[in-house]
Amino acid sequence: MDEKEIFLTAEGLKKLEIELEDLKTVKRKEIAEKIKIARDFGDLSENSEYDEAKLEQAQMEEKIAKIENMIVNAKIIDDVQTDTNTVGVGATVKLLQKSTNRQMIYTIVGSAESNPLEGKISNESPVGKAILGKKKKSTVQVQLPNGNVVDYVIEDITRN
């Protein structure tokens, strides 16, 4: 089965590796201890603490598998190779919203790292999709989830 590439910065990959290590070494032991303690409460068929600990264990194992999959399918965004002629993953883009004359600066990242509050938008977001592959001074129309259409001008494309 072909998995989709996960675009990550080197920093984003490092964060995932640290989180994975913590889940595997620290969290697994904590949950195993919770399960052990819950078993000591007696009858497992009516033991809510045991059921809760087993559910937490299953959720954590699912998260570990998801992070491992992301790491295996990671495509590292190389800032040095980021093209500043067209918008691509890894580029920092200065946009002008035409209707409000408001400027915004976003770095285009993969969905795993997107955080609009930090100015990082996903290449899969409405704005990200609309501006990918476009050049400086291009005007793009973005259909927002609420149905509104917004026009943006790409004022600049730089490396992060």
Image: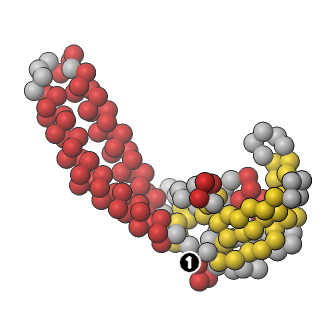
Is residue 4 something that shows in the picture?
A: no
Query: Which type of secondary structure does the marked residue at label 1 adopt?
Result: loop
At 75% across and 42% down in the image, what residue appears? 145
Q: What kind of residue is marked 1? A: Asp
At 68% across and 53% down in the image, what residue appears? 125
- Mark 1: give few (<14), some (14-19) or many (20+) Cα within 10 Å: some
Image height of 144 relative to 114, above or below: above
* Position in image of residue 90 (x %, y %): 62, 71
Q: Nearer the viewer, residue 73 or 98?
A: 98
At 23% across and 40% down in the image, what residue appears? 31
**For this view, does 105 lie left or right of residue 148?**
left
* Position in image of residue 86 (x %, y %): 76, 75
Residue found at the very far top of the displayed protein:
46
Number of numbered discs on residues:
1
* Position in image of residue 41 (x %, y %): 12, 22
Is residue 41 something that shows in the picture?
A: yes
**For this view, does 1 lie left or right of residue 41?**
right
Q: Which residue is mark 1?
A: 78
Image height of 36 relative to 41, above or below: below
Image height of 96 relative to 40, above or below: below
Q: Nearer the viewer, residue 45 or 20?
A: 20
* Position in image of residue 151 (x %, y %): 87, 56
At 65% across and 66% down in the image, what residue appears? 107
**Image colouring:** secondary structure
Quadrant where the C terminus is found in the figure: bottom right
Quarter holding residue 78: bottom right
